Amino acid sequence: MKKKYLTIALFTFILFTACEKENENETKISQNNTDESHNLGQNCMTCHVSGGDGEGWFTLAGSLYDKSKISAYPNGSVKLTTEPNGSGTLVNTIENDRKGNFYTTQTIDFGDGLYVGVFGTNGEQKFMSSKITTGACNSCHGNTTDKLWIE
């Protein structure tokens, strides 16, 4: 009888640890030289939100393209600051991966808005002139405004 309960307990343990728990916020942060992402140019926060199908609830996510605006720009970064053109306090830096995507589940306090700069691997940089109050970058970029790109 002890063997039967041990087998059931072991099966239950394996079953519940092998399956991901639904609707949990996993830590996900993009990094240079990785390729874990997908769906270049899509609004990441369609799935990567509480109750969504994606792993992790993103607070900032998007895609960075090269100057052709067709191909991904790999291994750059996105910086959030309190003042325009990269000035003020640096709030967060998120690297983008080899597929051009950047994302984080880290808490970001957008407050009254933050400024965004994108940075390339050879010192290239571009800045948004207006503040953002949400991190769903691809909800606008590539839809109602130009894609995020760098030379």
Image (spheres, grey):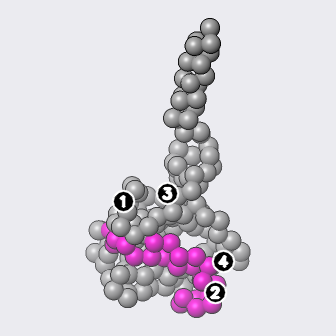
Q: Quadrant of the N terminus?
A: top right
Q: Position of residue 78 (x, y in %)?
A: 48, 76
User: Which sits earlier in the primary sequence, circle 4 or circle 1?
Assistant: 1
Tell me: residue 55, above or below residue 42. Answer: above
Query: Of label 2 and label 3, which has the lower sequence position?
Result: 3
Mark 4 or 3, nearer chain start: 3
- Quick one: SS at disc 4? loop
Q: Secondary structure at mark 1?
A: loop
- Find disc 3 in the rendering and name its residue: 44
| Disc 2 crowd, CA 10 A, few/some/many (<14, 14-19, 20+) | few
Q: Earlier in the sequence, mark 2 or mark 4?
A: 2
Amino acid type assigned to the residue bearing label 2 in the image: Thr
Residue 12: which quarter of the image?
A: top right
- Magenta stretch? 72-95
Q: CA distance from mark 2 to mark 1?
A: 30 Å
Mark on residue 35?
1
Choose mark 1 or mark 3, whichever is in front: 1
Disc nearer the start of the sequence (1/3): 1
Q: Real-space Cα distance between discs 4 and 3?
A: 20 Å
Location of mark 2 (residue): 89
Amino acid type at mark 4: Gly
Query: How many residues crowd mark 4 within 10 Å: few (<14), some (14–19), many (20+)?
Result: some
In this rendered view, identify the residue nearer to me: 5 or 126: 5
124 or 7: which is nearer to us?
7
In percent of the image, x 35 and y 63: which residue is there?
99
Measured from the top left, where is residue 102 in percent x and y? 46, 66
Q: Is residue 8 left or right of residue 96?
A: right
> Where 55 falls versus 4 (above or below)?
below
Looking at the image, is mark 2 or mark 4 nearer the viewer? Answer: 2
Q: Amino acid at mark 3?
A: Cys
> How many angstroms separate mark 2 from mark 3 (CA)?
26 Å
